[in-house]
Image (cartoon, helix red, strand yellow):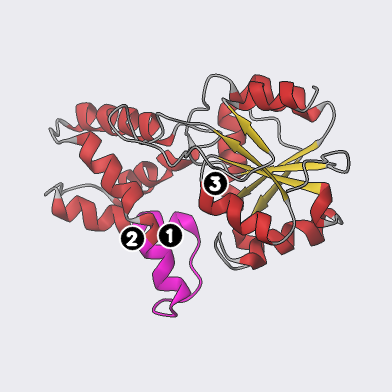
């Protein structure tokens, strides 16, 4: 496999888990919400089930069981189901909307802002996330993420790892595949991008699913760069 990265002009990033720590952020929001409402629940389990419902919900769209639906709406579908499962009742619609938008307020990993800021000096840096545009914009404002542009699967009306998402990014940025590097903490995302000719960078996030869970890193990952975090990626790319 060629490791010539001299043509790379732009980096697109997966966001949930790669740039932001969704799990700790959601648990913190749920704990705060529970305290304010006097609700006692296993909020870690709630957070994990909320995230766990995301892929099956996307598959419902892919299979045509439900029409195109953005991630905010899918998160709300899963939230409503979990509120019933955890027997949390008597919430107002405004409270449910606020709770669902916890995904707009996710905190970055400690290295993310510094690493992205360094990369921005040399490359175009963009999101390429299944999150909808309003979610990603709000998250960037909340967490100080210095994106040059917000790209979302919403623009292609497909979810990653569908090829249409990566092709839409290439089209909108007016780049060739070898000009663009996909950066993610998930091998399936990178393998889908690599199959289309994009360069790839794996960013290790061993704590994404909590201290007791293993991430999907393996010893034989076929990517152009393997980075410990985004600062390490910036160093490996000479910024």
Q: Estimate how packed mark 2 is, as few (under 14), some (14 to 19) or many (20 or more) residues with alpha carbons within 10 Å.
A: some
Q: Position of residue 76 (x, y in %)?
A: 36, 56
The label shown at residue 77 is: 2
The residue at the point 78 percent across, 46 percent down is 2
Q: Residues within 10 Å of mark 1 (few under 14, many from 20)?
A: few
Badge 1 marks a residue whose secondary structure is: helix
Q: Nearer the viewer, residue 81 or 231?
A: 231
* Residue bearing the label numbered 3: 135
Mark before the other along the chain sequence, 2 or 3: 2
For the residue pair 40 and 56, the one nearer the viewer reads as 56
Residue 161: image location, x then y, percent = 55, 60
The percent position of residue 118, horizontal first and vertical second, equals 75, 22
- Segment colored magenta: 56-76
Q: Quick one: SS at disc 2?
A: helix
Residue 101, compared with residue 34, is above or below; it is below
> Neighbour class for label 3 at 10 Å: few (<14), some, many (≥20)?
some
Q: Report the Cα–Cα distance between label 2 and label 1.
A: 6 Å
Estimate the x, y position of residue 218 in percent, counting from the top left.
47, 40
Q: Which residue is mark 1?
A: 73
Is 216 placed left or right of 19 in the picture? left
Q: Residue furthest bottom?
A: 64
Occupied quadrant, residue 47? top left
Residue 61 is a magenta residue: yes
Tell me the element at label 3: helix
Would residue 233 be found to the left or right of residue 170 on screen?
Answer: left
User: Relative to the observer, which residue lies in front, 199 or 184?
Assistant: 199
């Amino acid at each position: 496999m060629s490791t010539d990265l001299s043509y790379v002009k732009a980096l697109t990033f997966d966001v949930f888990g790669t740039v932001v720590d969704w799990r700790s952020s959601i648990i913190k929001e749920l704990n705060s919400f529970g305290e304010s409402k006097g609700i006692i629940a296993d909020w870690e389990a709630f957070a994990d089930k909320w995230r766990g419902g995301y892929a099956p919900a996307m598959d419902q769209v892919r299979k045509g069981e439900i029409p195109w639906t953005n991630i905010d709406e899918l998160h709300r579908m899963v939230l409503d189901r979990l509120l019933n499962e955890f027997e949390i009742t008597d919430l107002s619609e405004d409270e449910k909307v606020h709770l669902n938008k916890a995904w707009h307020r996710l905190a970055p990993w400690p290295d993310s802002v510094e690493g992205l800021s360094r990369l921005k000096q040399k490359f175009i840096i963009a999101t390429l996330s299944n999150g909808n545009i309003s979610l990603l914009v709000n998250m960037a404002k909340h967490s100080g993420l210095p994106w040059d542009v917000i790209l979302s699967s919403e623009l292609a009306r497909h979810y990653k790892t569908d090829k249409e998402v990566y092709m839409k990014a290439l089209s909108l940025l007016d780049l060739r595949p070898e000009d663009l590097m996909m950066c993610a903490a998930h091998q399936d995302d990178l393998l889908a991008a690599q199959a289309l000719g994009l360069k790839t960078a794996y960013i290790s996030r061993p704590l994404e699913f909590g201290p007791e869970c293993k991430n999907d890193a393996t010893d034989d990952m076929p990517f152009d760069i393997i980075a410990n975090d985004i600062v390490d990626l910036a160093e490996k790319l000479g910024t």
